């Protein structure tokens, strides 16, 4: 269970971690064949992982790719652990057959690097198969709209219900003093400056990177909700804590008030923010003076995260009144959910309406498509079709 929790909560920037491992392995590929395979297999996995990470942020596709993403993250972290130099090793990079041989013969946890690299090849192959299975499932099970890199946000009742459940966990006292992780990602804060070349807000403020952060929802003894931004560890392995306080107390809290500014943008739409190409299609949330490049944690998608924030804003103290309980402030079922939908749209902008053909298919779309495909195979598939129908009836 501890391993599962660590993996679910961990959020390593996989592309960066892969680049670190790959750059190192490029230099040893000529000396060791296994190093070459490890380098190329990691390199080949990177594009598919970028797609899976994007799908993992959204509510409809998250559950299909979650496990595959976490398996790949764990495997890459293990690769980095194997390649990392111990304190007693020479800092110079190996540059001939003898030095490479010494480097590979170093033991880590009782196993030589040479053997550890060989073992990792099988794990990376497993990652490739798992990721392929997950992405294939997405293609079969999810409507095309949700698979696009910048799929427009739609109102998803299940996401609102999940947000309600999370806030109720706090209200019922089931969440301890450490709070709950509701998001992870790269965070930037607006800072004052009179000298920075690239400034914003009339030349007085700019975005200052604050690194990877674990965003935790907290409830104070006074009954007020807030978001706490904790520094992430760069590598997440089973048994590691998922976040830590920086030296010097570089940890801050953003109170969720009724007037807190809240915006949803794509990263490349954030004014005066320099964005890497791989992050352009990542959803970003501006909350007060903080900007979060969102990544999901556990089963909390972008849709669930923004619903939580909108609900907390409605519950926040206002006009001299104490914080309202969730049941008094939010009713996601009122008028078929339309009242709450309009409240969220007031904060974040209008949701995209589903196309007419998608609405007609409804939740039975996957079953209908599977049956249609099987029927197209002809009479030879009649037995398989009957078996599938019987299995579906048992669910």
Image (tube, grey):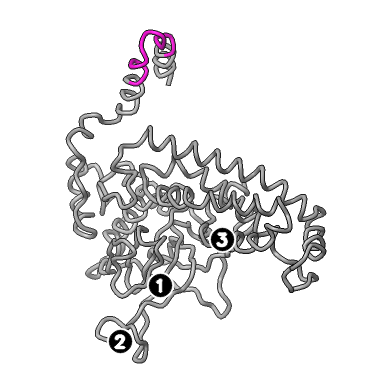
317, 235: nearer the viewer: 235
Asked whether 147 or 339 is in front, the reply is 147
Percent position of residue 159, x then y: 33, 45
**Left or right placement of residue 33 versus residue 287 in this view:** right
Using the rendered image of the protein, determine whether residue 317 is visible from the camera's viewpoint: no
Tell me what residue is drawn at x 55 percent, y 63 percent.
243
Q: Give me the residue at 30% from left, 39% from top.
A: 144
Kindly identify the residue that appears in the image at 36 percent across and 69 percent down: 291
Q: CA distance from mark 1 to mark 3?
A: 20 Å
Give the residue at mark 3: 17
The region drawn magenta spans 373-384
Question: Residue 190's quadrant in the figure?
Answer: bottom left
Q: Which secondary structure, mark 3?
A: helix
Task: Tell me whether circle 1 and circle 2 mark residues in contact (CB < 8 Å).
Answer: no
Which labelled disc corresponds to residue 204?
Answer: 2
Instruction: Give the mark, 1 or 3, whose residue is nearer the N terminus.
Output: 3
Quick one: label 1, few (<14), some, or many (20+) residues within 10 Å?
many
SS at circle 2: loop
Relative to 134, is 349 on the left or the right? left
């Amino acid at each position: 269970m501890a391993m599962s929790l660590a993996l679910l909560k961990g959020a390593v920037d996989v592309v960066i971690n892969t680049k670190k491992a790959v750059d190192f392995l490029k230099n040893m590929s000529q000396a060791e064949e296994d190093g070459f395979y490890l380098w190329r297999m990691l390199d080949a996995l990177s594009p598919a992982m970028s797609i899976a990470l994007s799908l993992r942020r959204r509510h409809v596709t998250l559950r299909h790719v979650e496990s595959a993403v976490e398996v790949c993250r764990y495997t890459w972290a293990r690769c980095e652990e194997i390649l990392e130099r111990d304190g007693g090793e020479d800092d110079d990079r190996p540059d001939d057959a003898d030095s490479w041989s010494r480097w590979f013969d170093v033991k880590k946890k009782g196993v030589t690097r040479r053997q550890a690299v060989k073992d990792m090849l099988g794990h990376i192959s497993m990652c490739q198969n798992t990721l392929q299975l997950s992405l294939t499932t997405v293609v079969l099970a999810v409507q095309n709209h949700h698979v696009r890199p910048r799929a427009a946000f739609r109102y998803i009742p299940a996401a609102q219900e999940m947000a309600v459940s999370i806030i109720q966990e706090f209200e019922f006292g089931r969440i301890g003093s450490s709070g709950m992780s509701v998001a992870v990602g790269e965070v930037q804060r607006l800072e004052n400056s009179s000298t920075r070349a690239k400034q914003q807000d009339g030349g007085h403020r700019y975005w200052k990177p604050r690194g990877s952060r674990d965003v935790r929802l907290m409830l104070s003894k006074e009954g007020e909700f807030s978001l706490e931004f904790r520094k992430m560890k760069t590598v997440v392995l089973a048994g590691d804590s998922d976040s830590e306080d920086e030296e010097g107390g570089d940890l801050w809290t953003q109170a969720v008030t009724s007037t807190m500014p809240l915006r949803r943008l794509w990263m490349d739409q954030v004014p005066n923010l320099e964005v890497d190409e791989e992050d352009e299609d990542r959803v970003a949330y501006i909350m007060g003076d903080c900007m979060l490049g969102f990544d999901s944690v556990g089963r909390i998608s972008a849709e669930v995260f923004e619903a939580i924030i909108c609900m907390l804003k409605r519950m926040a103290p206002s006009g001299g009144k104490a914080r309202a309980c969730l049941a008094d402030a939010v009713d996601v079922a009122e008028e078929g959910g339309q009242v709450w939908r309009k409240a969220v749209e007031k904060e974040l902008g209008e949701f995209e309406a589903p196309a007419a053909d998608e609405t007609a298919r409804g939740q039975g779309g996957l079953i209908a498509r599977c049956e249609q495909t099987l029927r197209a195979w002809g009479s030879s598939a009649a037995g398989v079709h009957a078996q599938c129908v019987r299995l579906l009836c048992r669910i």
